């Protein structure tokens, strides 16, 4: 194979060498560009998810209740999707919240957003579709799994 390529280059001289080099290197270059785009996109999704989770934790720490028709977890998912700055679909988010009485008791938890003064841990997972065909080939089913976790203390709001 190598000998055949050498003979081809010897016959063509400099005339066709650039064409052959371009034909051989273009797929490699395009694959690298596509992989870079996919990695950048997935990093942006992760950063948006982190930002949205911090915004949702700030909302929940004030003791507000979700609008009618939504549970607190559904509303937290909506806040994350809307404030992330990315096209995050709220239905692809999984929100798990655990409330603790204090930092020292982080082994005993109750589900939910907690009450005034409690510590709340938010665990968020998101299934993101791959942006490019190369990305779809890298992961099972073309889905990237992002996860983030935020711990915050609820404000000492008055319970209703």
Image (cartoon, helix red, strand yellow):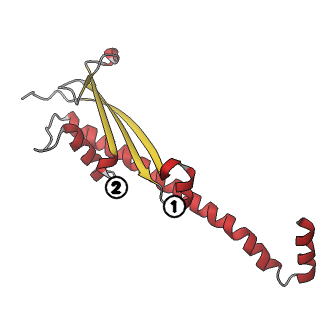
Residue 24 occupies quadrant: bottom right
Residue 61 visible? The answer is yes
Q: Residue at x 6, y 29 (%)?
A: 160
| Residue 47, image x, y percentages | 42, 48
The numbered mark, 2 or 1, whose residue comes first in the sequence reads: 2
Measured as percent of width and height from the top left, residue 65 is found at 13, 38
Camera sees residue 13: no
Most distant residue in the left direction:
160
Where residue 85 is drawn, which disc sits there?
A: 2
Disc marking residue 123: none
Q: Is residue 108 above or below residue 34?
A: above
x then y, percent, for residue 74: 23, 42
Secondary-structure class at tag 1 = loop
Marks 2/1: CA–CA distance: 20 Å
Foreground mark, 2 or 1, reads: 1
Residue 132: mark in rendering: 1
Q: Secondary structure at mark 2?
A: loop
Q: Residues within 10 Å of mark 1 (few under 14, many from 20)?
A: some
Front residue of 105 and 109:
109
Quadrant for the N terminus in the image = bottom right
Q: Is 142 placed above or below 55 here? A: below
Classify residue 68 as left or right of residue 91. left
């Amino acid at each position: 194979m190598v000998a055949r390529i050498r003979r081809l280059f010897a016959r063509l001289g400099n005339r066709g060498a650039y064409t052959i080099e371009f034909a051989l290197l273009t797929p490699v270059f395009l694959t690298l560009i596509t992989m870079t785009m996919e990695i950048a996109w997935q990093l942006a999704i992760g950063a948006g998810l982190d930002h949205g989770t911090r915004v949702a934790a700030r909302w929940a720490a004030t003791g507000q209740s979700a609008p009618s028709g939504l549970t607190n977890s559904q509303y937290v998912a909506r806040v994350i999707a809307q404030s992330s700055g990315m096209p995050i679909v709220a239905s692809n988010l999984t929100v798990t919240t655990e409330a603790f009485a204090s930092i020292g008791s982080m082994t005993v938890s109750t589900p939910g957003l907690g009450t005034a003064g409690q510590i709340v841990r938010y665990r968020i997972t998101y299934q993101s579709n791959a942006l490019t065909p190369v990305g779809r080939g890298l992961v099972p089913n073309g889905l990237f799994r992002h996860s983030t976790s935020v711990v915050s203390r609820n404000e000492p709001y008055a319970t209703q």
